[in-house]
Image (tube, helix red, strand yellow):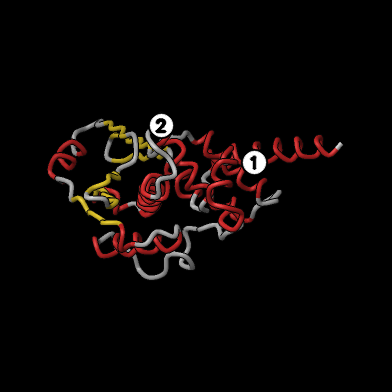
Amino acid sequence: MGWLADEFGENRLRGRVILPTDEFFPGAYTGSEVDVRRVFAMLCAHMDVDPARVDFEFVVADPGEQALLASLPGYTQRSAGAAGEYVRRGGRGVVSVDSGQAADPMALVATIAHELGHERLIGEGRIGTRADEEQLTDLLTVYFGLGIFNANAAFQYAAGGGGWRTTSLGYLSERTFGYALAVYAHLRGERSPAWARYVDANPRAFLTKGLKYRWAEHEREQF
């Protein structure tokens, strides 16, 4: 987080925290490709990415296989990693998002924010190849005020139709995202951030514990 502060500055740290509300994402959302591209444009604006230098690809998944599997009694599925991709092609950044993400706006924002994070880090030449590139990119979403979405999408559980499904998205755990949000809030001077109520219960518990620890350490250092 300190490295991100050095790279992107204090103004970004003090910027607005993006919430899953109509204030930040106005208009009806139906999950269409048009809607997804509109979300992409909104996130480009927030993350200071010029959309003219990044190509966006909406990858339509084959619904047949997923529908067949989901119809099986007791079917269990777990998917890991971000349902998107960032590559450099012809000197340009290319962000691809699986159409399956369109049904879940929280996961969609998390995925696009992560991939645009690659553009800010790799596309702008801030980092080269490194082992923790994906984890660093997840942390960037926190520093850019989008951590609520990525923390909430880190682990999701849904049941129905005689089966269950767990989905993990991204490269950091709920625990790590919760603590990252605590560090972020502490750096901003926030003891009890109003935005914390939008964080899901599990990562919010780690956020609360992390804030208590960070501020206790801060007070000890004053003496």
The picture places residue 120, in percent across and down from the top left corner, at: 42, 50
Judge from the rendering whether residue 196 lies leftward or rightward of residue 88; answer left or right. Answer: right
Crowd class of label 2 (few under 14; some 14 to 19; many from 20; radius 10 Å): few
Nearest to the eye among marks 2 and 1: give it.
Answer: 2
Judge from the rendering whether residue 68 lies leftward or rightward of residue 136; answer left or right. Answer: left
The picture places residue 203, in percent across and down from the top left corner, at: 54, 40
What residue is shown at x 29% (from left), y 62% (from top)?
37
Judge from the rendering whether residue 71 lies leftward or rightward of residue 19; answer left or right. Answer: left
Residue linked to disc 2: 130
What residue is shown at x 38% (from left), y 39% (from top)?
169
Label 2 SS: loop
Residue lying at the far bottom of the rendered structure: 27
The picture places residue 133, in percent across and down from the top left corner, at: 41, 35
Q: Which amino acid does label 1 sit on?
A: Thr
What's the mark number on residue 208? 1
Judge from the rendering whether residue 153 lies leftward or rightward of residue 30; answer left or right. Answer: right
First in sequence: mark 2 vs mark 1: 2
The picture places residue 206, in percent across and down from the top left corner, at: 59, 37
Label 1 SS: helix
Crowd class of label 1 (few under 14; some 14 to 19; many from 20; radius 10 Å): some
| Marks 2 and 1 in Cβ contact (< 8 Å) | no
What residue is shown at x 22% (from left), y 50% (from top)?
90
Judging depth in this view, the residue of 27 and 190 nearest the camera is: 190
How many angstroms separate mark 2 from mark 1 (CA)? 31 Å
